[in-house]
Image (tube, coloured by chain):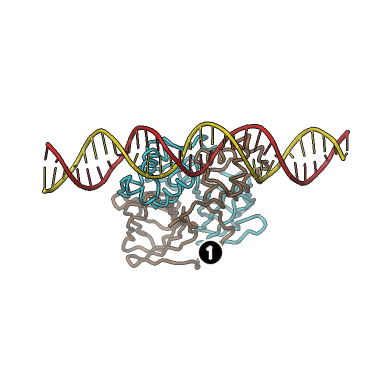
Chain colours: A brown, B cyan, C yellow, D red
DNA sequence: AACGAGTGTTCGTCAAATCGAACGGAACGA
DNA sequence: TCGTTCCGTTCGATTTGACGAACACTCGTT
């Protein structure tokens, strides 16, 4: 699952990093956030177990969304050519999904490229609760969405739907392709 | 910016929601998380200001990534047809970006469809720190990425790069299209 | 050197978050 | 009806996070 001990060190580093970036001193940040200088010092040293109120005040003062302080950092430029990447073929239908970007542990969002041919539907059972899928059609046409109310999509169309309920993807044209963003929340 | 007071109520609701979903009683959750039943009761009633350690233990016990407890919930099925949606045209180049999915307040990830014609480059100044862009080409070819090391992309290619540094998008073919996921972290 | 203004750290005090046990109710069987 | 067992809440005791003043330190300036 997710790491099972609070990421004190990571938070410590994040605070210092963001504070440096903003060019603030502990005194500045103290005034701006309303927190005691001593508290900040302790947090940056990895000592301490901040309350939600404290963490939130920090996020506001540093001008970063709260989760930026607790979530892990990430890599940089990455390129996957059209043929490359891990491909998951469907037994059910002529359907290939390539994982392009998967969230690091403490996941968030996976990005898939899909290539499909007309024929059987590709039916997906629910993913973990809270998942939302975003689909953009690049070429061809497809019938996609929740099993009980799928939508016909043409190139350029965008559809989002709950990923934690059964849903389908059916290509209507040859070489139908698109992008799916799977949002794990 | 982001709301400037900690979302106690939202957390309270989230805890109860997740606990219900898992079919656990306060007693169960107490044992599993190592937190006192009383503490949980207070948190679910919106009273209290949990420490990071407490929140983290909750996330682990409930089996949800930490941020799921503090971040706002989200909508359901949404469809934007090829012609629809807010379009931001670039003055610099023949370039149109359509916002498909924007994160609710406390943002995370925006999804754009892009349509571009060859000509001037579309150069983007850095977005907020921590932003990462993911680009998938649907049709045509493009030269994109960080200004100092752009990459030539063909249909199906995927590229991710820091959005908080200057970057470019230049269409090489007519009617080049693709999808950009902008990840705000 | 002696000063002032800045840095980040250390320490005693107080408020408050957490704990654990006791509590009142609801559901079910003997 | 009583006993059992679960539920979630309340309350006093204890731990501990946040505060703020005092601290040691580094720079420039006089």
The 10 Å Cα crowd at callout 1, few under 14, some 14 to 19, many 20 or more, is some
Residue A26 seen from this side: yes
Give the SS element for disc 1. strand
Quarter the N terminus of chain B occupies: top right
Residue B39 locus on image (x, y percent): 40, 41
Write the residue at 47% across / 46% down.
B100
- Residue displayed at 41% across by 42% down: B73
Residue at (41, 51) in percent of width and height: B64
Marks counted in the figure total: 1
Towards the viewer: A81 or B12: B12
- B94 shown above or below D18: below
**In the image, B7: left or right of B150?**
left
Side of A24 where B11 appears, left or right: left
The x and y percentages for residue A14 are 59, 49
Residue situated in front as seen by the camera: A103 or B171:
A103
Left/right placement of residue A183 relative to residue A48 reads left
**x, y percentage for residue B164?**
61, 49
The one nearer the camera, A83 or B174, is A83
Residue B103 seen in this snapshot: no
Q: Mark 1 = which residue? A: A80
Q: Chain of mark 1?
A: A
Residue B128 appears at what percent x and percent y?
Answer: 59, 45
């Amino acid at each position: 699952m997710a790491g099972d001990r609070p990421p004190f060190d990571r938070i410590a580093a994040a605070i210092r990093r963001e504070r440096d970036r903003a060019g603030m001193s502990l005194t500045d940040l103290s005034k701006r956030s309303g927190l005691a200088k001593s508290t900040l010092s302790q947090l940056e040293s990895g000592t301490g177990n901040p309350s939600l109120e404290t963490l939130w005040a920090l996020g506001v003062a540093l001008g970063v969304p709260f989760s930026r302080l607790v979530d892990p950092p990430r890599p940089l430029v990455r390129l996957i050519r059209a043929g490359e990447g891990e491909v998951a073929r469907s037994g059910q239908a002529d359907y290939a999904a390539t994982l392009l970007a998967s969230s690091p542990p403490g996941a968030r969002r996976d990005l898939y490229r899909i290539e499909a041919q007309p024929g059987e539907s590709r039916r997906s059972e629910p993913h973990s609760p809270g998942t939302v899928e975003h689909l953009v059609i690049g070429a061809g046409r497809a019938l996609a969405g929740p099993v009980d109310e799928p939508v016909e999509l043409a190139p350029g169309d965008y559809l989002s739907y709950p990923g934690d309920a059964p849903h389908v993807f059916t290509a209507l044209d040859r070489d139908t392709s698109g992008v799916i963003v799977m949002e794990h929340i």
